[in-house]
Amino acid sequence: MILSFVEHAGGSPDEASLEALTLARELATATDASLEAVAFGAEAAALGESLGAYGVETVHRVADERLDTYAPEAWAESIAQLVDDLDPEAVVAPGTDRGQEVLAHVGAKRDLPMAANCLDVEPSDVYELSRQRWGGSLVEHARLDADTKLLTAAAHEFSPETASEAAETSVQPFEPALDESAFRVSVDRVEESDETGVSLGEARVVVGGGRGVGGGEDYDKLETLAGSLGGTVGASRAAVNEGWRPHDDQIGQTGTKISPDLYVACGISGAVQHMVGCKGADNILAINTDPEAAIMQKADYAVVGDLHEVVPELNDALDD
Amino acid sequence: MDTVACIKRVPDTGAKLTLTDDEQHIDTSHLGFTISPHEECAIEEAIQVADDHDGTATVLSLGPADADEQLRTGLAMTADEATLLETDGAEWRPRETAAALADALSGDADDPDFDLCLFGNESADVANHQVGIRVAEQLDIPFVAGVTDLTIADGKAVAERDVTGGTEVYELDLPAAVGVKEGMNEPRYASMRAKMQARKQSIERQDPVAGEFDGAIEKVKLEAPESTDGAAEVLGEGTDAVPAVIDLLRDDLEVV
Amino acid sequence: MSSDSLPSQVSTAIIGGGIVGNSLAYHLARMGRDDIAIVDKGPLPDPGGSTGHASNFLMPVEHSKEMTNLTQRSIEQYKDMDTFTNSGGIEVARTDERVEELKRRVQSAKAWGEPAELLTPEEVEDLVPYVNTDLIKAGFYSTGAGTCDPLRAGEVMRARADEYTDGGLHVSPNTEVLDLHVENGSIQAVETDRGTVTADEVVIAAGLWSPKIAEMAGVDIPLTPAVHQMVSVGPISFFEDYEGEISFPVVRDMDTQMYERQHGNDLEVGSYQHRPILWDVEDIPSIDEAPLSPTQPPLTEDAFEQSMADALEIVPELLDDPEAGIRHEIDGLLSQTPDGAPLLGPLQDVDGLWSCAAVWIKEAPAIGEAVAQWMTRGWSDIDLHGADVNRFYEYGNSRSFVKDRASEGFQKIYDIVHPAEQYQSARELRTSPFYEKQADLDAEFFEAAGWERPQWYESNSDLLDRYEDELAEFQRPNEWDSRWWSPIILAEHLHTREHVSMIGDMGFSIFDFRGSDVVDYLERMAVGRVDVEVGKTVYTPILAENGGFVSDLTIARLGPEHYRVVTGGAAGGSDRAWFGDHIPDDADVTMIDRSESLCTLGVWGPNARDVVDSVTEEDMSHDAFEPYTAQKITVGEVDAWAMRLSYIGEQGWEIYAPMGQGRRLWDVLWEAGQDHNVRPAGMGVYGTTGRLEKGYRLFGHELELEYNPAEAGLTFHGVKDADFIGKEAYAEAIDEENTATLCTLSVDDHAPEGGERRFMLGNEPVLDENGDVLVDDEGRRSYVTSAGTGPSVGKHLLMAYLPQSHAEEGKRLQVEYMGQQYPVTVEVVGSRPLFDPENDRIRS
C-alpha cells in the first residue's frame, strides 16, 4: 500500500497534494499496490468525493478535533501511528513546507530515512529515485532502503493527473493516541496578510522585476501590469538586496518558487538561482535591453527593449 | 539566553554546476565556499538574540577541517564561540548528521546547552529538509520550520511563518529549535576588525558521533541536467513589440 | 552596431570586449578601418575579465616616461568620454627610504610633465582627514590623478566606433573563440561557436585569456593571471555627507603595498603585499561556473590577514565604523608579465596576428590608440618598444619563466625599484661559452634579454688601488647611488684605456640575410647605404616612416648577397619582428637568426692588436684590417669572424665565433693577453662609461620614436639615393632647424648644499637657471636619457635632448635629483665624442 498525505482547504485538495498523489499512484500502479490517503480536519471527509478520480481507495481522516489546527508533531505522530497500523510500502507527501515538515517528523519518530523533493521513483525492494539538489539545478540519483519509504514530491514537477479508472473511495476515521505533549507546537493564531490579491506562489501571472528596474518606485509600472493581468509582482534576489522589494517578493532558490501560466521577467538577467524559482512557469516572457542576457535563452518569448518604455506602453494598450 | 546556529560549509556556485568525473560531487576546484543564505540569517538571529538577552551565541558545524572558514565567518559576525564536528570530508547523511549535532548539543540529558537553536530551513546543496527536525526530536524540544520572524518574550519564542494569505504564529517553550528562511533579518557584513580577530579565535574541534541506523538513503551519483533552452521567440524591439505582446497575451496565453 | 550576428568577413577582428578591445575598435575606426568585429565570450558591458573588477584609479606618475605618457593620454580620453573624476591621489611614506622614493616620484613627475608635489603629514591630513598621519612621514600628491568608469567608457567607445564606421562595427558578445586559422604563416580567420569570421588582421585583446587564444595560433603571449586582493567596506557614515563616487584623493599606502580609495559610501581596500598567487589560465572558471565573475575568485583569507591589520592602522576611523562591514571581497585576477610591462604588437610568427594584452585600466585608452596607430601606419606616437610582445622571443615564453618573473615582479608593483635592479629568479637562462670563465673571475652578472653578462669583475678590485687618485672624486657615498654599481667599473674603464680588456658576451642579436634581393631589401630598411664593398660595416639608424627610431645597429656585408645585422640583445625580438615583417612577399630574401649560434668577444684597448695578432693566422695590422671592416679570421684553432669597431672608442675587434668554440676563443685570447696586461671588463664599461665618453647613443635611451636622427645627431650618412623607410621625414629633419638636440652634459657640483656627493642615474629633469624644466617647441621636456661617470674625462656625464635655445656648449643648467638641484654644464652639442674626438684610438 502506498499512503499519500493530502493537504486541503475545506475539503478541496491542494495542487501540490495532487502532484504528490500523482507520484504516489505511479508507485501504487507499478507495484500493484493500493493507494490510500491521509488527511486532517473535519472537512477532510469531503475528500472522498474528489480523490476517487485520482485512484485513492481509502481516505484516512485523522479524527481528533485538536488536530484541526496545524500541529506538525501531532500530525506527524498521527501519521506515524497510521503507518504502524497499515505498514505502507511508502508515504508520499507534497513538497510543501508542511509536507516536508510533517514527513521529517515522521522519519524522526520512527527512525526512517526520508527522501525530499523526489523527481522520479523506481519502486522495487529498494527504491531507486532521483531528487532535487541545489534548488533543482542538480539531480541526485539515490537508493532508498527502508521498511517504509518516506518521500516528498518536488513541487511543480508532477502534473496532477486523474487515474485511468476512478476508484471508489471510502473515508475512514483514524483516531490516534496523542499526548498533550504532541501539541507543544501548533499554530497559535493566523494573522491575515494586509496584502490583497493573490500570493506569489499561487498567482497565475507573475510580473518579476530585477536589477534593471532601477529602483523601488519603478515597480509601480510593474504593479499596474500585474493588476491588468490579474497577477502579482515578484522580484529577483538582486532587487531585494537593493531594498526595492520585500523579501516576500523574492523569486528563486531561497525565495518563493512560482508556477504561473505566465511569468513576465522585466530587467532580470536570468541567473540560475533565480531560474530555479520560476522554472515552474508555463510561459516566460522576458523584457530586457540586452538580447544576450541569459534570460533570453531561457524565456519562451522576448522583447528586446527597455522595460521603462515597453511596460508603460503595454499598460496603455491593456487599458484600452 | 544562549543560542546556537548550526551551519554548513557549501560551495559558492555560479550559474552552472560542474561535476567531478566520478559524478559524486560538484567540482569545487575553482570555487570558494560559503554558508547558505538561510543559515546566514540563522547566525544573525542567533547573535541578535544572544546580544539582546545577555547570552552567548555559538556557531556549530559538522564538516571537514576547512569548515572552520565558515565558522570564522560566524565569529567575524560576532558570534562568541565556534565548534566544529570535524569529518573526513565525506558527505554525511541526514540522520547521521542530526545524531552528531544532537549529541554535541545535548549537554546533560535533561538540559541542553542552549535556549535556542537555529537551523537553515534546508541546506543550499543537498536540501534534505530534515536535519533540524531530527535534532529537535532527538533532544525532545519543539521545532518550527520555515520561520521568517522570531521574537523572544517571557521565556517563550514566538515564531512566524508565511503561508498563503497570511502568517502562522507559533509560541514555543524554550529551549526550542527553528528552521530559518532567508528574509528573517539582514545578515550583517563582518567588520574588518572583527574578521581579523575571528582569524585568531580558537575553534573547538570535536569528533562527531555518527550513530547507527536501519535502512538508509544512499547517493548513487549526481547529474547536472542538460539545459534544454532554446532562444526565446523575439516579439520585437522596444515599444514596437507591444502589439505582438498584446496578441500573445490575449490569443495564445489567454491571460487578458 | 549589429550585436546579434557575427559577420563572415571583416578586415579586423578583435578578440576581447574589455576596455582594451573597445579602445582598439574606437581608434581603428577613427583612423579609417570601417569593418571591425569585437568578439567576446562574455556578455556586455562587463564580459567578466579584469575590466569588470578593477579599482579604476589612475595615478599617472611612474618612473617610465612611456607609461606615464600613456596614462596622461588615457586620462584625456576618459575625460573626453565624461568617464573621469579628478580626485587626485596621494602616495604616503611610512619610512625614510620611501620619503626618498617620493622625492624621486616628484622628479619623474617633473621630467614627464605631470603636476605633483611633496606633502607634509599635516597637508596629507588636510586633504584626506581619515588617514592616520601618526604613521606617515610624507605624501606625494598627484593632483591630476582620478578614477574612471571603464565599462561606461567601453560603451562610449563602441558607440563612437559605430559612428566612424557607419555601422561597420560588429559586436558579438557571448561568442567563444574556438580556434584561430593560420595558413602559410598568416592569420586567416577566427572560428567561434557562432561561426567563423575571416579577417585580414586579428588582435588578441583577451586580457588574461590571451595566452590561451595565442596558443590556438601556435604562438606565445607570455603572461600569467595573478591575484590582486581587494575588499570593499561599507556603508561608511563619514562618506554619507559627500555626493558622488569619490570626494577624496586615492591613498596609496606604499610601504604596505596597499591602497584605500573611496567608492561612494564604501572604502575599497586593495593589496599587493600578499604572497604572489598565480593562476593557470586553464583553471579560471567559465562565466557560468563563476559565482561573481571568472576573474573574481573568492578571497584567499590567510593571505589577506596582514593587509587587514595594515589597513586598520592607516584608516582606523573609517574601517571601525560600527555600521560598516566587508561587503565584497575578491582575489581579483589581473595579467602579470615577466617584466610588468604590457605585451603589444604584431606576433612575429603569424602575419596579421597582434597582441594587445596585459594592459591596465589606467593606460588602456592610450594603448588602444597607440596600437591602432601601429597597425594602421606602422608606428605609434608614444614609443611602445618597451612593451613589444616579441621582447621575450626565444627565451622568455616558458610557463616557468613567466611564473618566476611574475612572482618576483608582483612584489615590485608598489616596491621601491632601483633603475638597475636585477631579477633574482629565472637566472642563468642564457649563458655564453665564457660564462664559467667569467664566474671564475668573480664576475657580477647582470641580465639582459635572458643573457648573463658581467657588469664588473670583483677580481679586478686590485685596480681600485692602481687608480685610486683618478677614482677619488667618483666614489659614491650614497647607498642608492651606488646600489647595483661598483667603482671597479671605473677602474676597469681606466685599465682598458691604458692597456687592453676582454668584454663579452654582449648578448647581441645577430641576423644573417641572404638572397638575390637582399641589397634592395636592406637599402629599404636602413638609413645608411648598404650597397658597400664586401667586408665593409655600416652603423645605421633604422627608422619608422615618421623618422623616429626603430633601432640602431651594425650591418656588415659578408658577400655580394649576404649581410649580417648585429643589434642589441634587448631589442632583438622587436628588431627581428620589424625586419621579418618588412621582407616583401615576393622578394628573394632569407633571414636566419644566428643569435643563439654565435658568441661575441670584444678585445679593446691600446694593446688589443698585440694580443689578437699574436694568435691569429691573419695579418691584423691597421692596413690589412682597416677600421669599420669585417673579415674571417682564425684565432688559435677557432674559425671566427671579426669586425674592427668599438663602442668604447678603442683599438680592437668584436670577434664572433660559433658558441661551441667560444670557450676555446676565450682561452686563446686570455693566454695571449697575459703578456699584454689583459683584464676582463664588464658591461659597465661597454654600456655606460666608455660609451658616454664617446657620445654613443643607446637605443631605448637616446634613440626612440619621439626624436629624429637630426636631433639625435645621427645624420652622418646624409640622404642616400635609394628609398628607405622614413626617408622623407629624415630628409626633412636634416633640412629643418632642430627643435631639440641631443647633448652631453657634465655635473659641476655633486654637493651644492654640502653633505653627501650625489650621482644621477638617469631620467632626471633638466632645468634652466630658474629651476623650470626645459621644454622644446614641440612640448617635449628635457630629461637625462643616460647618466654615468666618464673617468677618463674626469666628469660625471649626462645625455639629454635640449631645446635649441639651450643647446649651447658651455651653457649652465641644472638637474633635479632626489629633491635637490645640481648645476650642470653643456659639454657637447651633438654627437662629437668628449673623449678622443678625432677617434684616433679606433683608427690606431
Image (cartoon, rainbow, N blue to C red):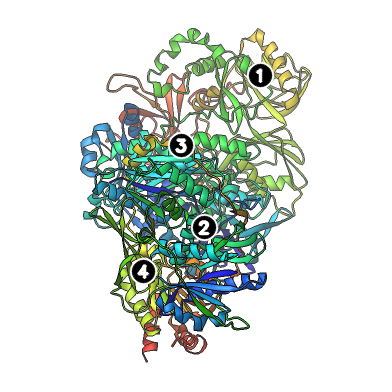
Sequence-first disc among 1 and 2: 2
Q: Secondary structure at mark 3?
A: strand
Q: CA distance from mark 2 to mark 3?
A: 54 Å
- Identify residue type, mark 2: Gly
Please indicate, yes or no, whether residue C359 appears anywhere in the rendered image: no
Residue B206 image label? 3
Using a 10 Å C-alpha cutoff, classify the residue at mark 4 as few (fewer than 14 neighbours), some (14 to 19) or many (20 or more): some
**Chain hosting mark 3:** B
Q: State the residue position of label 2.
A: C21
**Camera-side residue of A116 and C447:** A116
Q: State the residue position of label 4.
A: A66
**Chain hosting mark 1:** C
Q: State the residue position of label 1.
A: C436
- Farthest bottom residue? A320
- Identify residue type, mark 3: Gln
**Camera-side residue of C816 and A119:** A119
Q: Are marks 2 and 3 on the same chain?
A: no
Q: Say which quadrant the C terminus of chain C sits in.
A: top right
**Camera-side residue of C32 and C6:** C6
Using a 10 Å C-alpha cutoff, classify the residue at mark 1 as few (fewer than 14 neighbours), some (14 to 19) or many (20 or more): few
Q: Secondary structure at mark 4?
A: helix
Q: Nearer the viewer, mark 2 or mark 3?
A: 3
Q: CA distance from mark 1 to mark 3?
A: 60 Å
**CB within 8 Å, label 4 to label 2:** no
Q: Nearer the viewer, mark 4 or mark 2?
A: 4
